[in-house]
Amino acid sequence: MADPNHQTLRGDNPKLQQLLSAGWQVVSESWGARMVISDDILARCQAKQAPPPGWVVRELDATDTTQAAALQGAVISDFPITFSSFGVLTAAEQLKAEMTAGNLWLFGAFDAANQLGCYVAFEKADQYAPGLIDIANAATLPAARGLGLAKATAAFGILTLAKLGHRLYGAGGAAQNTASLALVKSLGGDITENYYDIVSPEAVATASPQYAGTET
Ligand SMILES: CC(C)(COP(=O)(O)OP(=O)(O)OC[C@H]1O[C@@H](n2cnc3c(N)ncnc32)[C@H](O)[C@@H]1OP(=O)(O)O)[C@@H](O)C(=O)NCCC(=O)NCCS
């Protein structure tokens, strides 16, 4: 049942200002972005798809899903937890099933020992817009962050899927997740919307998101 003391509203919803004037308070913010394949996006992705030395980027297959699930587990506690944004763990078998069904593509960066250091997930999200592919999840091992792995992996993924005809991409995350926001902007994503999680005056002291780490 919906919590009557919590709402998530788009920044352009007039109800937001009404409730804030009535004493509701913002407890977290998130953003949504869109990317439509264009010559500019393709050129950006081509320029950014090369991984740093010592790393190889490729599409993952069913045999890689155990490593992908393990990497999810290793970074899950780094996802900011808000009412609207949180990390999700997916078991290897489920990843395999979604990939086989054609609903999910995973791309990853492997080191010289063939260890997965970064992956980016692309998920069919037709329920939000026809043909939309959600860049649903990006994860880099803490020791390998800031090297350009997520950027190279995401760029490679977009170029691969664009060749298959997928032209519309979406992404979203918590406002405080500066790295994921920078990743999407770096690839040419436009921030199209902002969302605000607000709580009623009665609930301000106790508001606490509880959705992290959901097993699916
Ligand atoms: C988000 C995450 C995947 C980025 O991985 P990464 O491999 O370190 O990212 P890259 O090195 O490819 O950098 C991508 C862009 O983000 C920027 N960036 C990286 N870390 C950053 C940080 N902590 N703050 C601000 N910008 C950052 C880089 O400069 C680059 O932008 P640029 O092309 O304009 O220079 C990684 O921080 C992570 O695993 N976080 C925890 C899980 C998470 O929150 N995932 C996001 C869900 S989509």
Image (tube, rainbow, N blue to C red):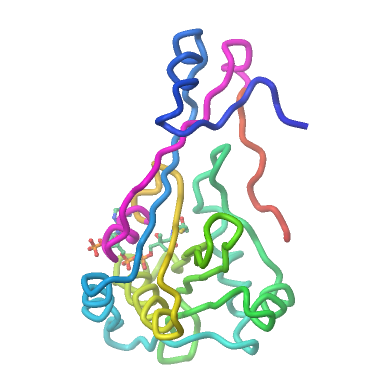
Work out whether 53 lies above or below 4.
Answer: below
Of all residues shown, which one is farthest toward the top? 22
Q: Quadrant of the C terminus?
A: bottom right
Residue 36 shown left or right of residue 18 in the figure: left
**Residue at 61% from the left image edge and 72% from the top image edge:** 70
Name the spot of residue 112 as percent of width and height, x first: 41, 91
Residue 117 shown left or right of residue 99 in the figure: left
Of all residues shown, which one is farthest toward the right? 1
Name the spot of residue 190 as percent of width and height, x first: 31, 54
Work out whether 52 lies above or below 197.
Answer: below
In this rendered view, identify the residue nearer to me: 123 or 109. 123
Residue 84 shown left or right of residue 177 in the figure: right
Q: Quadrant of the N terminus?
A: top right
Residue 73 shown left or right of residue 42 in the figure: right
Q: Residue 188's image quarter?
A: bottom left
Ligand 1 resides in the quarter of the picture at bottom left
**Residue at 42% from the left image edge and 66% from the top image edge:** 168
Name the spot of residue 14 as percent of width and height, x first: 44, 22
Q: Residue 6's image quarter?
A: top right
**Residue at 47% from the left image edge and 22% from the top image edge:** 16
In this rendered view, identify the residue nearer to me: 50 or 33. 33
Q: Which residues are magenta?
A: 180-206
Name the spot of residue 186 as percent of width and height, x first: 26, 62
Check if residue 186 falls in the magenta segment: yes
Total label count? 0
In this rendered view, identify the residue nearer to me: 132 or 146. 132
**Residue at 46% from the left image edge and 84% from the top image edge:** 164
Work out whether 164 lies above or below 172.
Answer: below
Check if residue 199 falls in the magenta segment: yes
